[in-house]
Amino acid sequence: MTTRRLFLWTLIIAAVFSRGSASAQHGRVIGANVTTSGSVVVYKGNLDVYGTVRGDATALRGDVILHRGGRVTGNAVAVGGRVRLEGGVVNGKIRSATREVRQTRARRVRHASNHTGRRVGFAFGWLLIVAITGFAILAVGGDKLTIVMNTMQQGIGKSLGSGLLGQLAIVPGAIAVVGLLAASIIGILLIPLGLMAFMFIVAGVAMFGFVAAATMTGAAMTGRHRDSTPHGAMLRAFFTGTALYLGLWIIAALFSGVPLLGAMLAAFASAVTFIAATAGFGAVLLSYWRGEFKTSASVSSEPA
């Protein structure tokens, strides 16, 4: 808030709550031979002053008009209007907030538009990152992705519970990394790198799990196509599921300017994405704990 606007609203509050003030709606006229006992505030109308206002003269959504012979001993303030001197005198300051109100509304509209644009751009950015990461996983680790999907299909509740436990273990895991590195002088110097590597692994596991969850969701939506190879079907399922999850965020971003609906859509998108990412995260941990990744690697390495 600028100093000018702060001063303006200070004048308004002082005028409204000052002692001996009087207020009226739909305009008021101070006659030529009338002297008020205090400030005057008018709502939704003009304040015509022919006499004397002992204090401030304030019009909210109207004009303060000082006619010939009119006098205001305090300040003249118009919010949503203007102060018009038509032969009258104002001993204090004159403030008109028409321009300030319009500028404030325009700034709010621009801010809301920019906020929505940033949210939509952020959603599209994540869509691109997830798409590139998922394509890379499908290219080099499609067999492991299938293992994680099978783990989720065997019990989504187990995967979700394992994901929650894994998330709770992130902070203790980071503390354990610091403790192990702090056991030696060289390790102390490597603590920042160790924490970065740990968080990178956690983020990679989480991304891998979300790609698996998105692919499984897309497979349920698209089904099987006779003309599709297994790799092509998985690729189609991945892009379909990713578009579904990220589409929720794009819709929430488009309606972010709507007070209640925007918050509800954002909460729904957050809940759905959290459940999918957590279930995928837990499925990756379960698959690794069971040794299924090692089994898959040994099978694939056997000569045909």
Image (spheres, rainbow, N blue to C red):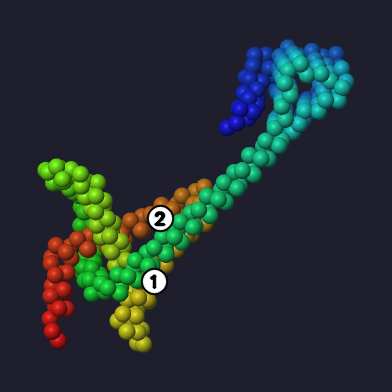
Q: Residue at x 32, y 76 (%)?
A: 234
Disc 2 is placed on an element classified as helix
The image quadrant that residue 64 belongs to is top right
Q: Are marks 1 and 2 in contact (CB under 8 Å)?
A: no
Identified by mark 2, the residue type is Phe
The residue at 52%/57% (across/down) is 254
Secondary structure type for disc 1? helix
Q: Nearer the viewer, residue 12 or 103?
A: 103
Identify the residue shown where x is 22% and y is 60%: 282
Residue topped by disc 2: 268
Residue at the (34%, 80%) spot, across then down = 232
Between marks 1 and 2 in the image, the one whose residue lies nearer the viewer = 1
Count of marks, rendered view: 2
Q: Percent from the top left, x then y, of residue 93?
A: 72, 21
Q: Give the camera-side residue of 256 and 46.
A: 256
Query: In the figure, residue 103 lies in which quadrant?
Result: top right
How far from the left and from the top, in percent, is residue 146? 24, 73
Name the N-terminal-most of marks 1 and 2: 1
Callout 1 crowding tier (Cα within 10 Å): few <14, some 14–19, many ≥20 = many
Task: Please identify the quadrant where the N terminus is shown.
Answer: top right
- Numbered mark located on residue 239 in the image: 1
Q: Is residue 8 above or below residue 243?
A: above
Name the kind of residue labelled 1 in the image. Phe
Residue 269 is left or right of residue 291, and the answer is: right
